[in-house]
Amino acid sequence: MTSVSPGGTTPPEPPPGGVGLGGTNVPSPSGGSASSRTPLADPPAGGESIAPDPPGPLGRRWLADLAWLPGQGVVSDVLIEADGDRFTSVTPDYSAIVPASSATSAPERLHGLTLPGFANAHSHAFHRALRSTTQADRGTFWTWREHMYGVAARLDPDSYHRLARATFAEMALAGISCVGEFHYLHHQPGGHPYDDPNAMGRALVQAAAEAGLRMTLLDTCYLAGGLSPGGPLPLAGPQLRFGDGDAAHWAARVTELGCDVHGMIAPHAQAGAAIHSVRAVPRAQMHPVVAWARRFGAPLHAHMSEQVAENQACQAAYGMSPTRLLYAEDVLGPRTTVVHATHVDDGDTELLGGGQTFACLCPTTERDLGDGLAPAQALAAAGCPLTLGSDSHAVVDMLEEARGVEYAERLARRARGHFTAEALLHAATTAGHTSLGWPDAGEIAPGARADLVTVSLDSVRTAGAADGLALEAAVFAASAADIRHVVINGRDVVRDGVHLLVPDVPGELSRSIHAVLGREPPL
Ligand SMILES: [Zn+2]
């Protein structure tokens, strides 16, 4: 198979509402998309009901000092209106048009710079428990992985739910309105399924609801413990929890999540598919995952070429690079995201860009693990929309991820100015949401999902920004600590830096992490 068309051999139903491939977000007049269709009326089969996601209130109005609008850049004095979970109108220079005395009701003021919600396109929630723990070590990605397996071995659905709820709440505080959770910790220790084989995935979906986020649950096929020249290696130790036996059994389990024909699991959550990597999914097992994703029009993600050793193993086993293998197996295309793409050559880059495959970069994790530098500019120039993920959660800060792409390029090329602040924010918003199957989110525009993130411009990090350079101040100097207000689907989730749904996020992080690691929590 050589096609990289989105349809492949089984054409998917195109999502209504118009997916702007290449990262362009084009909400339909009806606001429709696969992710905005009527969700299941009944709870998912085989598990607890998921907490409802009440729509935002009707008739909300905000007046932003500054807002970043599609096609207009940063505009001042912007009235933003929403009904339920959708923006209904966006009016720049509002005060000049409507004198304050004639306004029917005063809109809520948003001081600072207001942006669309951020999409965290690549997350493993349980890695949050590794923060700090792994920083006392030397080693490599492979030694770090042993620590990660140690945490994976200790989780059950309840402890996973508590850890994920706190982690997702941290994300909301950082302005993240949607998370792509790359989920492979499926079964009990030893590999035995829970009574509900999707108990762990459902714990994540519930956690996202409680933290106020939308989610794409990228249910991950993970079948092999590595790749040798003679072929795939069996799962061993903690990896046994990841495996479904083969891709057909993986597909059967994921289908039991109970998603509707559009892949919706709950009002706030949709199902996606993932091939963990060429190390973990044998070549012959890739097609059933691709076919499942196409059946539901679901996003398909895969780790790819994060490590040189992965490329070498793929070359030895299959005689080609991971990119070429995924291309040959019809995995690539405009509904697919490859995560990392760190060690790709010019030919790989051409294949990825030609298929408009998303490339998700995770700069804070890649530098934490010493992975190397992805050729970000070459990937973008070839046609790959770039997205961003906090991956291992060494930090959770999408502004840091965004500028990390530019800074890595500066170090590699010894020159400045490869990506504008606007291009980096595009990766954090429209492209990220589209890669997760939410093409109707990521812009402040009528018809789009009503997600707002307001960045303070008077903190110690951002004060003194020059007129006209608010976007640059936010992307290159602000941090997650400067996120003041977050609205998701028209609902207030963060106000004045306080999470409104999870009252003690640091406390929940501390308690859940200490419990997972078997430590006494601090007094
Ligand atoms: Zn990852």
Image (cartoon, grey):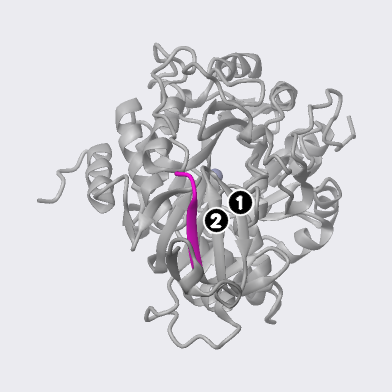
Query: How many numbered discs?
Result: 2
Tell me which corner region of the image, top left, top right, bottom left or bottom right, holds residue 417: bottom right
Residue under label 2: 81
Residue under label 1: 88
- The region drawn magenta spans 57-63
Report whether residue 479 is seen: no
Residue 81 among those drawn in magenta? no
Identity, as a three-letter code, of the amino acid under mark 1: Thr
- Residue 511 drawn at (x, y percent): 22, 44
Sort mark 2 into few (<14), some (14-19) or many (20+) by Cα contacts within 10 Å. many
Residue 520 sits above or below residue 252 on the image = below
Q: Residue at x 71, y 74 (%)?
A: 418
Residue 288 sits above or below residue 272 on the image = above
Judged left or right of residue 409, residue 4 is right
Q: Are marks 2 and 1 in contact (CB under 8 Å)?
A: yes
Q: Residue at x 66, y 61 (%)?
A: 426
User: Disc 2 or 1, which lies upstream in sequence?
Assistant: 2
**Residue toward you, 87 or 499:** 87
Residue 52 sits above or below residue 164 on the image = above
